[in-house]
């Protein structure tokens, strides 16, 4: 197990549900060291991951910054209530509340994948309380894109006019579809499937080890995990503002770190161009770095990511 140099924080809740987080105080600070005035760094994981995914980043970042990492509701060791509407708005509000209630200092928010979208949305909402945003292969869509096409309303209404159609819809919705979802869920949380999936999204599979696989598998065994899986996949997108609108609201500098060989990014160059272009149109202070890595560069090439983040943080 990696030496995180981080400890679990005291219990904190959002909307009445317990949220797990860890933190590491600023280390190696002397009386004359200006590091004591540095902003706090908050790390936000991606889909299926947790605070454990920052195992190689927290020790380095905490040499010059107080560092926190948080498990989004529905993931990791945080609660997984079935009644919540999972998506960008929920996680944005959770991060904003954590910064305001727990950290209470200007904060740089770092996010990977869907955690990147939540980090950006939270930083935009925090305004001057945000000291910066770091996006690692962030999820999200732009105003000129469709999140997911909506069902064809006309055909749906026509089926409802036919008794057999109603019966079929009920059968699919309440029996067949949940059964298929359950089978997919059970398959996805098998250790060998987790390992195989990670090897597809890591260019260098060296860090796809037993610790990483167990950190993803363990939360999937907790009560409520399957319901979260169902809700996330039925949510039809992140249900938040488009990236370009969030850029217009952001008041903090932006660092874009891309694993340039990410198989989960459709048309990666086009996606990167859009992030860069819309950030510049919003007059943001933006820096972009391409890395030879996959979807999770912070865990695959942590030395490079840590170096880029620390250099960027030093300049801001």
Image (cartoon, rainbow, N blue to C red):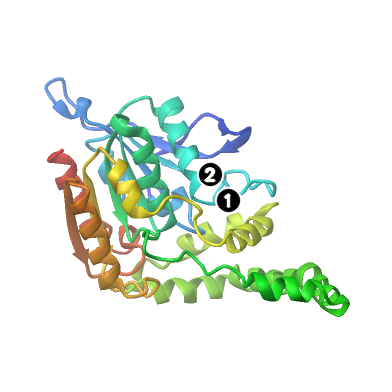
The quarter of the displayed image where residue 67 is located = top left
Q: Relative to 142, does residue 78 appear above or below in the rendering? A: above
Check disc 1 and report its element: helix, strand or loop: loop
The x, y position of residue 270, in whole percent, is: 27, 71
Q: Is residue 159 visible?
A: yes
Q: Is residue 94 above or below residue 232?
A: above
Q: Nearer the viewer, residue 15 or 297?
A: 15
Q: Residue at x 60, y 36 (%)?
A: 18
Instruction: Check whether the beta carbons of the residues at disc 1 and disc 2 lie within 8 A of each other.
Output: yes
* 85 relative to 300, above or below: above
Q: Nearer the viewer, residue 133 or 167?
A: 167
The Cα atoms of the two marked residues, 1 and 2, are separated by: 6 Å
Q: Taking 141 as reference, is 59 left or right?
A: left
Name the residue at 77% across, 76% down: 159
The foreground one among 156 and 139 is: 156
Give 264 or 168, whichever is nearer the viewer: 168
On-image quarter of the C terminus: top left
Question: Is residue 2 placed above or below 151 in the rendered structure?
Answer: above
Q: Quadrant of residue 68?
A: top left
Disc 2 crowd rating (10 Å Cα; few below 14, some 14-19, many 20+) is some
Q: Residue at x 39, y 60 (%)?
A: 141
Residue bearing mark 2 = 90
Mark 1 residue crowding within 10 angstroms, few (<14) / some (14–19) / many (20+): many
Q: Secondary structure at mark 2?
A: helix
Q: Residue furthest bottom?
A: 164
**Can I make out residue 4 in this image?**
no
- Quarter of the picture containing the N terminus is bottom left
Residue 118 relative to residue 304: left or right: right
Q: Is residue 298 left or right of residue 224?
A: left
Per the image, the residue denoted by label 1 is 86
User: What is the quadrant of residue 271 in the picture?
Assistant: bottom left
Residue 26: x, y in percent?
A: 28, 31
């Amino acid at each position: 197990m990696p030496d995180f140099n981080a400890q679990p924080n005291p219990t904190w809740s959002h909307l009445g549900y317990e949220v797990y987080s860890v933190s590491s105080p600023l280390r190696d600070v002397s009386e004359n060291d200006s590091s004591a005035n540095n902003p706090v760094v908050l790390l936000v994981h991606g889909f299926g991951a947790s605070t454990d995914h920052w195992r190689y980043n927290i020790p380095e970042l905490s040499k010059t910054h107080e560092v926190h990492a948080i498990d989004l509701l529905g993931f990791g060791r945080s609660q997984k209530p079935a009644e919540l509407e999972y998506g960008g708005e929920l996680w944005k509000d959770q991060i904003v509340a954590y910064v305001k209630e727990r950290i209470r200092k200007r904060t740089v928010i770092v996010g990977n994948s869907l955690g990147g979208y939540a980090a950006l949305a939270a930083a935009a909402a925090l305004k001057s309380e945000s000291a910066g945003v770091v996006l690692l292969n962030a999820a999200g869509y732009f105003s000129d894109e469709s999140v997911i096409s909506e069902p064809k309303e006309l055909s749906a209404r026509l089926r409802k006019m036919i008794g057999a159609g109603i019966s079929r819809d009920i059968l699919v919705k309440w029996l067949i579809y949940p059964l298929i979802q359950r089978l997919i869920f059970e398959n996805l949380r098998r250790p060998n499937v987790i390992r195989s999936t990670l090897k597809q999204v890591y260019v260098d599979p060296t860090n796809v080890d037993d610790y990483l696989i167990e950190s993803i598998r363990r939360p999937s065994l907790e009560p409520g995990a399957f319901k979260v899986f169902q809700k996330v996949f039925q949510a039809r997108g992140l249900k938040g503002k488009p990236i370009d609108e969030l850029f217009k609201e952001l008041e903090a500098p932006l660092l874009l770190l891309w694993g340039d060989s990410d198989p989960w990014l459709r048309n990666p160059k086009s996606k990167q161009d859009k992030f860069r272009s819309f950030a510049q149109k919003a007059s943001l202070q933006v820096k972009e770095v391409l890395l030879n890595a996959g979807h999770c560069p912070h865990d695959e090439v942590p030395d490079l990511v840590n170096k880029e983040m620390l250099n960027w943080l030093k300049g801001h």
